[in-house]
Amino acid sequence: MVLGIAEPHSTGSVAWDAALAALVDYWLSKSRLPKPEWIDSLSRFLETPQPPQLGEYDLAPELDEVPAEFRRRNVLVDRASLESV
């Protein structure tokens, strides 16, 4: 799996940069694959818990619905949004 081999450039948003690292961590953890070092860079963590804003009416999910890979980076994305439909 090539997900995350090379560190992506910053999106310009700290929240989205952290979310991207969390997403790579999440999927590689599920597949029990090695993880790249860049996902643990301090620039890929938020200081306070927050959802990456898609719109002004986005609500933060309940913490027990946030996967550990996202929670540890303070990125509030609920588990259901990561499921395939």
Image (tube, rainbow, N blue to C red):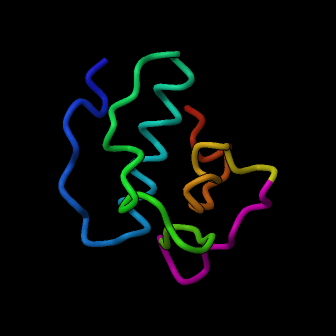
**Which residue is nearer to you in this view: 43 or 65?**
43
**Residue 7 in magenta?**
no
Please give the range of residues in magenta.
54-63
- Where in the figure is residue 32, as x and y percent of width and height? 52, 16
Q: Tally the marks.
A: 0
Q: Quadrant of residue 15?
A: bottom left
**Which residue is nearer to you in this view: 16 or 39?**
39
- Which part of the image, by quadrant, shows the C terminus? top right
- Which part of the image, by quadrant, shows the N terminus? top left
- Where in the figure is residue 84, as x and y percent of width and height? 55, 32
- Where in the figure is residue 40, as x and y percent of width and height? 41, 46
Query: Magenta region's main secondary structure?
Result: loop
Is residue 72 positioned above or below 58 on the image?
Answer: above
**Left or right: 9, with 32 as reference point:** left
Identify the residue shown where x is 57% and y is 22%: 30
Identify the residue shown where x is 62% and y is 61%: 76
**Residue 62 in magenta?**
yes
**Left or right: 31, with 16 as reference point:** right
Is residue 78 positioned above or below 15 on the image?
Answer: above
Is residue 38 positioned above or below 84 on the image?
Answer: below
Identify the residue shown where x is 18% and y is 55%: 9
